[in-house]
Image (spheres, coloured by chain):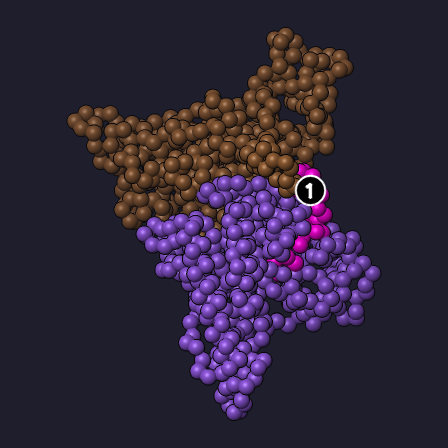
Chain colours: A brown, B purple
Amino acid sequence: MIRKALTGVALSAMMLASPALADTIAITGGTVWTGTQDAAIENGVVLIVDDKIVAVGDARLSVPSNATVIDAAGGWVTPGIFAPFARTGLVEVGAEAATNDTAAVESKYSAALNAADGFNPASTTIDITRIEGITRMAVAPSNGNRMFAGSGFIADTSGDAGSILRENVFQLITLGEGGSGLSGGSRPAAWATLRAALDDAQNYTGRYVTGPEGAALNRVDAEALAPVVRGQQLLLVQVHRASDIRRLLGILPDYAELDVAIVGAAEGWLVADELAAADVPVIIDPFDNLPASFERLGATSKNAQRLIDAGVTTAFAQLDSSAHQTRLILQNAGNAVANGVSHADAMHAITSIPADIFGQTTLGRLRSGAAGDVVVWDGDPLEITSAPSHVLIDGEVQSLESRQTLLRDRYLSLEDGDLPLAYRK
Amino acid sequence: MVRQNSLLALCALALVACGGGDKDSSGEERAGIDRDPYPSTYTPRPSETVFITNATVLDGVGNLIENGSVLLEDGRIAAVGADIEAPDGARRIDARGKWVTPGIIDNHSHLGVYASPGVNAHADGNEVTAPVTAEVWAEHGIWPQDPGFTRALAGGITSMQVLPGSANLFGGRGVILKNVLGRTVQDMKFPDAPYTLKMACGENPKRVYGGRGQAPGSRMGNFAGYRQTWANAVEYKRKWDKFAEEGGDPPSRDLEMDTLAGVLAGDILVHMHCYRADEMVQVLDMAEEFGYKVTSFHHGVEAYKIADRLAEADTCASIWADWWGFKMEAYDGVRENLPMVHQAGACAIVHSDSEVGIQRLNQEAAKAWSDGRRAGLDISQADAWSWLSANPARSLGIFEETGSLEIGKAADVVIWTGDPFSVFTKAEQVYIDGALFFDLTDDSLLPVTDFELGQPGQGDRK
C-alpha cells in the first residue's frame, strides 16, 4: 500500500518551508475524520512531515513529490485512538503478582506511587493494543491499601524506550464502596480521610517540618498530592453512585484550584446537569449497564447519550479489563452509538476528549501541528469487523505484528513438517 | 432425559413390580430413585402465528436466505424460505433491511449463581469446600431474580447453560434454562434437557486447594484427583449395574457418584474448563481411560493449537473471541481461535462466562469471524452463526429442539435491526417458543426483576 508518489505535484507553501530531507508521508483517498469537525472529509489527504501533521484537507491538497504515499482508498483515516484509562504496560499476566505492577497492597506509600515506575514498553500488551489502532493511553495505577492509588502517566504504544510522554499527569483516588473499604469501612471515613489529606497537601511543607506524619498522609504522599491542590495535576476520582458524585461536586467550591475528572460514573446520568454545570468531565464504560454493585443500581447503556446530551464532557474507556483489553474501546464506542450516541461524539470520546481531559492538545485530532498519530482503517473504525491497515505514531509507521499474530501464524497449519512447530517462526 | 416421577408414582401407588425382574430398567429405577426430582415447570407462553418476511435469514445450519421469510406457528418454526406464503390470520412483520436468526444460546453462564449485584451473599457458584463436589447442582444456587437475565434477553439470548464455577476438579451439575423469567428456577428449566457436569483443569483448582496445603496443589494433583474419582465412579456404577441385573439390596447411594455414574452411562454431558492445549489432550486420553466423553472444553484459549485433535474426538471448544492474559494459562490467546477451530473441522462455540459478554455474543462472533477472514480463513457468516446457536445447542443435547430455524423446532428466534455482525445492530424482537418476550420499541415488553423494582432507573432501557 505504501508507494512513492511518482508524479510531480506542486508543493504547498508549507512543504516548501520544511527541510529538504524531511520524511514526508501523505495519506490519500480515505474518509478522513479529523476530530476538528463532525463531518468526515471524503477522499481526504493527511500530510505528515517527520513527527507532525502539517496539513489536512480534501483531494485538492497537493501531495509533494518526495512523499511516501499511503493509499487509504475505501478506508477511513482517523487520529490515533487515545485510551483514557488503561493499565496496559503495567501488567504482563494478571494473576502473576511478580508481573503485575498496578497496585501495592502492602506499601507504606500511596499517593507517592508513580505508575510510570512500573511501565514496560516491551510488554506484549503494548503491541497487542497498538495493532488495533490505539496509539496513546492514560495509564493508571490501582488502589493498594488506601483510597489514594498514586499517579498516572501518558504513554504511546510504540514500544519504544521513550514512549512515556509525560509522568504524574493525574492522581487517582477511589470513593464510594471502594473508598469506604480502603478507609476503615464507611463513606464518612473515606471523606474524613480525603479532607484531611487535601489539608495535608495544602499545608505541605509546613506541616512536616517537625516530623514525617500529617493528619492523613505521610510527608512523601503529601508531597505527591500537593500539585493536585494547587491545580497543577488532575485529580481523577473513581466513583459511581449519584449521591457520591454529588458529594464530590459539593466540595469543589472549597478547593478552588482543584481540577477534577470522574472515572466510572455508572449513575452519572442521574446527575448529568450538575456535572455539566461544574464542568467536570467523566470517563465511562458504555458496557456498564448492570447493577453490578449497590452503587451502580442505576447503570444503563443510555448513560453515554444522556451525559453527552446534557453537555458533560464524556470519554469512553474499557474499565472491565483495563490492562489486556484496552483495545476493546472501539467496541465500547460502537456500542455507545448503537445506544443513541452520535458517531462523531463516540469518536470524540476516544480521541479528542481524552486528549483534552489530560491536557494533551497535540493529540487526538488531525490538524496542522498535531503529533503524527494517524490510523488508516479498512472500514468504519467503530465497526467491530474493521481493522487498521496502518498505524503511525509520531509520524513513524508502526509494525502490525504482535505475539498473538506470531502464535496465529505458527499454528495456521497444524501439519507437522520434518521439525516440530517450535522451529516455525 | 426421561422423567422418572411417573414410574416412582406407579411403584408407590399401583403395586407395579418395581423390585426386580425387569432387565431393561436401570439400577435407579429399580431402587425407586427419581433422576429428575426438580422437574421443569416451564411452559411456553401464548403465541401468535407470526410471518416474518423480506428479511435476510440465517437459518443457523449454513444457509443465508435473501428476502427470506420465517413462519412461526404454535410456538414452532413452521416454514423457512424465500418463496413461502403467509397463512390467513398471521401477523405479518415486514423485516426489510433486518436479519432473522435462531436465538443465541450461551453454553457458559453464571447468571443466577453469581447474580448482580455481586455482593457476598450472591456468591453461590463455587462450592469451595472440597475439590470434588460432583454432588452439588447449579440450579440450587440460582437466584431467578438476577437482573442479568433481562440484559441477556436484550442481546438475543434464548437459552443458556448455567454452570458451577471452576474452583473444583468436579464442580457439580450444570443446568440448561430457557431465558424466560420465572418465580422459580424450575419455571426456567429447559424441559427434557440433559444434565451436565462441570469439571476444571489447570490453575484454579490447584491454586484454591494448594493454597490451603490441601490436594490438589499441582497439575499432577489435579489429574490424580480426577482419576481416583473416576475409578471410584466406575466401581460405583458397576455395583448399580449389578443391582439392576440381579436385584437384591440396592447399594448405598452417594450423590457425588450418582452424577459421575450418569456421565459414564452417557446421560450427563461433560463440560470442562481447560485453557491449555496440552492439558486438553491429556483430558481426552483420560476420558478414554475411563470410558466417557468430553462434550466440550470451555475457555480453551489454546484450542487453536489442537483443533485437529478436537475434531477427531468430536469435542467442542467453547471459547471467547479475544480474552487473554489474565492468568498464565490464558497467555497464548489469539484473535483467530474460533475460526481456526472451525476451519479444522471441529465444533466451535462462542461462550460468555460473563454477565457483560452474554449481552453481545453476536459481536464476539463477528470479531473472530472478521479476524479469521483477514488471516485467510474464509468462513461465511451463515457458517459462523453455527458458533452461536447450533453448536452450543448440540453441546447441551438440545439441538433436536432448538438452535436452528428448521421446521418443527421451537420458535426461538431473533429479529435484528440489521446485520448482526455489525456493532450498530441490536436485537429488535426476541421470541422464545414463539412468544414475544422482548421488543426494542415496546416498553410493555421490558422485563423488570423484583430486585430492580423501586430502584434508581427502574424500567429504564438498560
**Which quadrant of the view contains residue A74?**
top right
Q: Nearer the viewer, residue B65 or B32?
A: B32
* Amino acid at dot 1: Leu
Q: Tell me the crowding category of disc 1: few under 14, some 14 to 19, or many 20 or more residues within 10 angstroms, Cα based.
A: some
Magenta stretch holds residue B392: yes
Magenta stretch holds residue A175: no
Number of dots carrying numbers: 1
The answer to whether residue A7 of the structure is visible from this angle is: yes
The residue at 34%/27% (across/down) is A227
Q: Position of residue B149 (x, y in %)?
A: 53, 60
The residue at 54%/46% (across/down) is B277
Q: Position of residue A417 (x, y in %)?
A: 64, 37
Does A38 sit left or right of B450 as displayed? right
The residue at 81%/63% (across/down) is B84
Q: Which residue is mark 1?
A: B377
Which residues are the magenta region?
B371-393
Does B411 sit left or right of B444 as displayed? right
Question: Compared to B126, does A224 lie above or below?
Answer: above
The answer to whether residue A272 of the structure is visible from this angle is: no
Question: Compared to B247, does A71 lie above or below?
Answer: above
Q: Which type of secondary structure does the marked residue at label 1 adopt?
A: loop
Q: Outermost residue toward the front?
A: A418
Q: Outermost residue toward the bottom?
A: B15
**Which quadrant of the view contains residue A265?**
top left
The residue at 42%/43% (across/down) is A95
Q: What secondary structure predominates along the stretch shown in magenta? A: helix
